[in-house]
Image: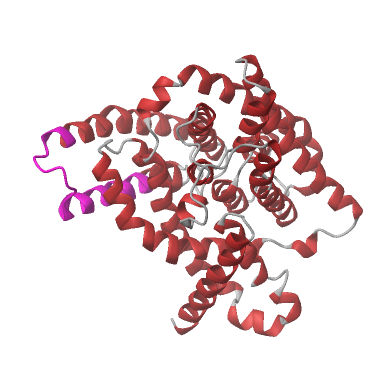
Amino acid sequence: MTLLLLQMTMVLLTALLCGWVARKLGQARVIGEIVGGILIGPSVLGRIAPHASAMLFPLTSFGSFEVLSTLGLILFLFLIGSELDYEHLSKQKATATLASTMSIPLPFLLAAIAAPFLRERFAPAGVGMLPFMLFLGISMSITAFPVLARILEERGMQSSSLGTTALMCAAVDDVCAWTLLAVALTLLPFGEHAVPVSHRLLGLAVYLVVMLGVFRPLGGWLARRQKSITLSYELFGAMIAVVLASAAATEAIGVHPLFGAFMAGLCFPRVKRWQSAIRTQLDTIVSVLLLPLFFALTGMRTRLDLLTGSTIWLWTAVVLFVAVAGKMGGAILAARWTRESWKNAMALGALLNTRGLVELIVLNIAYNAHVFSPTLFTMLVVMALVTTMITTPILNWLGIEDRGVVGRDLSRAEAA
């Protein structure tokens, strides 16, 4: 326990310092926290002081980090799902559907073209082409809805036509990506006694029917029956229990528990004060304590020392090019088809190109499932960092007006 407490102390202090530096440089706090995880990982601390690194972060201690960070991610994915706005999505469904139709299949297509070459060089032994291609395609096509929302809010664009379209596209992208991820996970072996893929797909279908056909209407009925508009202590506890049970159900099916948490958020009643209360009560513990452990774990898995030689860096550049060209290219084409100006089309592409925390979640799932090797994992982390970092500079270069409040600090759960 002493070692775990010391580890958490170092992780939190490093995350706070690096996050503060990132904000001063005009970047999202999550960028600094990921870099902080890399600093205390094998790429930096492990090379500068290998003995101290081995004593402070032995491999046997990663299990505690995994459990705590997974709990934080379950609550975080629930928050993301609970904040998707059905009403706005319905109003902008035509534009969001068109842009998402382009900004998901195009990067998927480019990833499918690159998958055989990357799998031959960087996939662990025994990984099938279909799961590898699905995970790579999801990694290339996902958008970080929370960082996008915070960038728009900070620049005062959340109510603009461009901002609304970007938010709706990102919402559709997130739902599609997590659904594809659930399907991809069913294609992988699960435990010593692997359940047949057909059984897992059936279990996933039954789960979705129960959540969307039973729990979502039940939540709406409960919201209408509740005499008080405030979220009581008992009701809050019951809802968290449903989130954990939903995560456990998808884990039992053979799908990652984060998908269950996200679905629980989608089924959460759309009562504004309830949504605000949930975020207020969960955000601090998730943002300050649990998510930094995930960033530290990601940083310690990121082996920059593996990216040696011109060939490896060339493939890293290929991964970055495929990710940017597919995501931005698809969004730009869709925006132009809806007669947006080139300026707005490129801005939409830049916004949807952000990856942030959501990308890192997908990468860690693929890493834990032994689909990505440490080298490919590191290459994709670099891609996630670069694509998130370039969003604000591109918007500034395009001359997109910043009408937000200067100096407003970002909460990291929204900036991830």
Q: Is residue 241 magenta?
A: yes
User: What residue is rendered at 19% in x and 48% in y?
Assistant: 231
| Residue 311 against residue 59 in the figure, above or below | above
Q: Position of residue 299 (x, y in %)?
A: 63, 63
| Residue 24 against residue 86 in the figure, above or below | below
Is 231 on the left or on the right of 123, as rendered? left
Instruction: Name the foreground residue: 86 vs 255.
Output: 86
Q: Position of residue 360 (x, y in %)?
A: 59, 51
Instruction: Name the foreground residue: 148 vs 62.
Output: 148
User: What residue is rendered at 41% in x and 59% in y?
Assistant: 286
Rendered image quadrant of residue 71: bottom left
Is 30 on the left or on the right of 242, as rendered? right
Q: State whether residue 298 appears in this view.
A: no
Q: State whether residue 42 appears in this view.
A: yes
State the extent of the magenta-drawn residues as a range.
Answer: 223-248
Q: Is residue 19 magenta?
A: no
Q: Position of residue 254 (x, y in %)?
A: 47, 43
| Residue 141 against residue 2 in the figure, above or below | above
Rendered image quadrant of residue 333: top right
Q: Position of residue 284 (x, y in %)?
A: 37, 61
User: What residue is rendered at 67% in x and 28% in y?
Assistant: 343
